[in-house]
Every structure is written in C-alpha cells, then in structure tokens.
Image: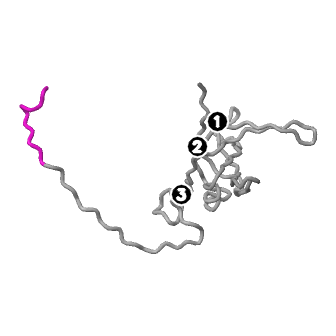
Amino acid sequence: MSINRVNISGNLTRDPELRMTSGGTQVLSFGVAVNDRRRNPQTGEWEDYPNFVDCTMFGARAEAVSRYLSKGSKVAIEGKLRYSSWERDGQRRSKLEVIVAEIECMSRSNQGEGGYVPAHQQAPRGYAPQPQERPQAPVQTPPATDYYDSDIPF
C-alpha cells in the first residue's frame, strides 16, 4: 500500500488560469509559494526560503473557485502529487504538481467579521450583502434526571 497525500498553505504566485479540455472538463491551473523557514548560518537570523508549487484542479468546481482566487490570495490545499514528463524541442522536461482535491481560501474577506472565510462561502466579486436578522434558536434545558449516588455502580 502507498499513500499519496499532500497538504500545503501559501500564497498564489499568479492569477489562476481556467481552460477546458476537448472533452469539456474544466481545468484550473495556478501556482502557490510555500515558505520554508531556516536559520541563515552567516547571520544567525531566520529567513524564509520559498518553494514554488504548481497546482491543478479539475471539474465543475474549478470554474467556481477561479472566481474567488487571484494573485496573492492565501490558500490551504489538500491533494495528491502527480509527476509528468514530456519532450519539447528535443529536450526532456518534467514537473511535479499537486492535483487539488480540497481548497480553502484563507485571505481576509470584507464580508466576514474579521475572520477567515472559506472560498465556498465567499460571495462573488461585486456582491453587496443585505443585512439580515438571524432568528434566535430557543434555549433548550436538559431533561431532569433522577440519579442517586447509590445508583452508580462504582
């Protein structure tokens, strides 16, 4: 048995690119910068060293997600690694990318109350929410119990 699972969080390095295959499947491609934090041996200071990760998302969700992401957006991604190799202009090329299964937008949103809003809960760009009253749920009291110390078996 083998496991192919990856979790990353970082910032988009470019605006997402939405394409469509000849079969009609939507494909969203974007890059994410993920920093490693290491101590610089000369200065002793901590420094960030970026890793650039190519990410690809397939299907109907790809189009919806593309509307909420832009360069600089902070995201958390869960997916799997896929290795691809091909030949171009007589040279062998390859890349390792993340195939996105789940994505969460972690950028601050002005629709939220100062917290993070997942991408699937964000409103489309240009949307102005209308104030709404939330109904209050009735307070439930727990049922009365008739247990005595002598009823407990220990």
In the rendered view of the protein, which quadrant contains the N terminus? top right
Of callouts 1 and 3, which one flags the residue occurring earlier in the amino acid sequence? 1
**Residue 147 in magenta stretch:** yes
**Residue 82 in magenta stretch:** no
Q: Nearer the viewer, mark 2 or mark 1?
A: 2
**Of helix, strand and loop, which one carries label 2?**
strand
**Of helix, strand and loop, which one carries label 3?**
helix
**Label 3 with label 2: CB-CB less than 8 Å:** no
* Horizontal side of residue 149 vs 135, given as left or right: left
Q: From what the image shows, is residue 1 above or below residue 61? A: above
Q: From what the image shows, is residue 51 above or below residue 14? A: above
Residue type, mark 3 in image? His
**First to last magenta residue range:** 144-154
Q: For the residues marked 1 and 3, what is the alpha-carbon distance in whole angstroms?
A: 34 Å
Q: Name the residue under label 1.
A: 38
In the picture, the disc for residue 120 is 3
Residue type, mark 2 in image? Glu
Q: Nearer the viewer, mark 1 or mark 3?
A: 3
Residue type, mark 1 in image? Arg
Magenta stretch mostly in which secondary structure?
loop
Q: Residue at horizontal 56%, vertical 54%?
A: 105
Q: Mark 2 points at which residue?
A: 78
Q: How crowded is mark 2: few (under 14 residues within 10 Å), some or many (20 or more)?
A: some
